[in-house]
Amino acid sequence: MKIISIQNKLGIPKYKQIIHSVEKAISEGHLKKDEKLPSVNKVCLAFSISRDTVLLAYEELKKRGIIYAILGKGYYVKSLEINLKHRVFLLFDELNTFKEDLYNSILEHLGPNVQVDIFFHHFNPNMFQKLIEESNGKYTRYIIMPTHLPQAPDIIKTLPVHEVYILDQTNEALIDYPAVYQNFTKDIYCALVEAKIKLKQYQKLILIFPGFREPIGMKTGFLTYCADFNLEHEVISEFNQRQINLGEVFIIPNDRDLVKVIEQSKQQNLALGKDFGIISYNDTPLKKVVENGISTISTKFSRMGQITAQMILAGSKEKIENESVLIMRNSL
């Protein structure tokens, strides 16, 4: 068979030899775009190998976007670009400034020979399921940000387990998957411990926790800290022009609530960092300058992207807790 060559004593798995043969045939011009590949049965008979071996090779080439299948007819050349090492399905919850940093870091560290297609589920379980179902079998790797959608683990389990990587949030139901994640309970607790001397200047800690997008670990870590240090505290689901009292510190995961709190403080002529305090979540360039600087608890999203990319390229299957830091500014 001219297109495909398999040697029994080469020491390379036969399915990989099939892949290399097709790549070589494309690069040398023996296979052109939309040209049909040898049928599965023909390859099996020619080399006395199983259908599973041939299908494994063809499916890998299909996931990389090199070939496509027509039901009942066979496999055809889709692309002459054979240098792509992976085609990656990247599913984010939403796009914002820090997720953009994460995305750019993933692209940078995966390099030019990896194609990344990005999608967003916007915390909608139906959209989450639809996107994963439509992507299944079309990519070599799946990077998924499941947030806290209760249906996510069951939906993710429909994908090949060895091709999935979990990003940002994980849980016990996803224990079988490699992940780069934030430990929200630990991160907020340790940050508040680090800020303890500053917090002593205030009388009450208030966590604004809508609970729709925010990880429950934030609330758990906050309540544990307040209980351990016997501090007056409150958890509210929304701000809505609430009156700010002297000596209150607001811990704010959502930037919309951050704006509301700052606007209300101006109406009351309160001085941020003196009359009341703010700790925001997720650092952005704007928070360095707004109101002379907003203190933040933030993971290093660029590092998260770098580690994820390195794991994919190396084929490693680790579970890595991403570093979080407290950045002190004038709002506290």
Image: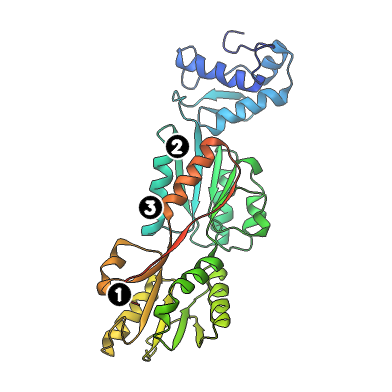
Residue at (58, 40) in percent of width and height: 316
Q: Nearer the viewer, mark 2 or mark 1?
A: 1
In the rendering, at what x and y percent does residue 149 appear? 59, 63
Horizontal side of residue 294 vs 122, given as left or right: left
Q: Nearer the viewer, mark 1 or mark 3?
A: 1
Q: Residues within 10 Å of mark 1 (few under 14, many from 20)?
A: some
Q: Which mark is residue 101?
A: 3
Q: Is residue 61 above or below residue 41?
A: below
Real-space Cα distance between discs 3 and 2?
18 Å
Q: Which mark is residue 254?
A: none
Q: Which mark is residue 330?
A: 1
Q: Amino acid at mark 2?
A: Gln
The N terminus sits in image quarter = top right
* C-beta proximity under 8 Å, tags 2 and 1: no
Closest to the observer: 46 or 204? 204
Q: Quadrant of residue 108?
A: top left
Q: Is residue 261 above or below residue 20?
A: below
Residue at (47, 79) in percent of width and height: 207
According to the picture, the residue beneath numbered tag 2 turns out to be 115
Q: Nearer the viewer, mark 3 or mark 2?
A: 3
Earlier-in-chain disc, 1 versus 3:
3
Earlier-in-chain disc, 2 versus 1:
2
Q: Is residue 235 visible?
A: yes
Real-space Cα distance between discs 1 and 3?
25 Å
Real-space Cα distance between discs 2 and 1?
42 Å
Q: Residues within 10 Å of mark 3 (few under 14, many from 20)?
A: some
Q: Residue furthest top?
A: 2
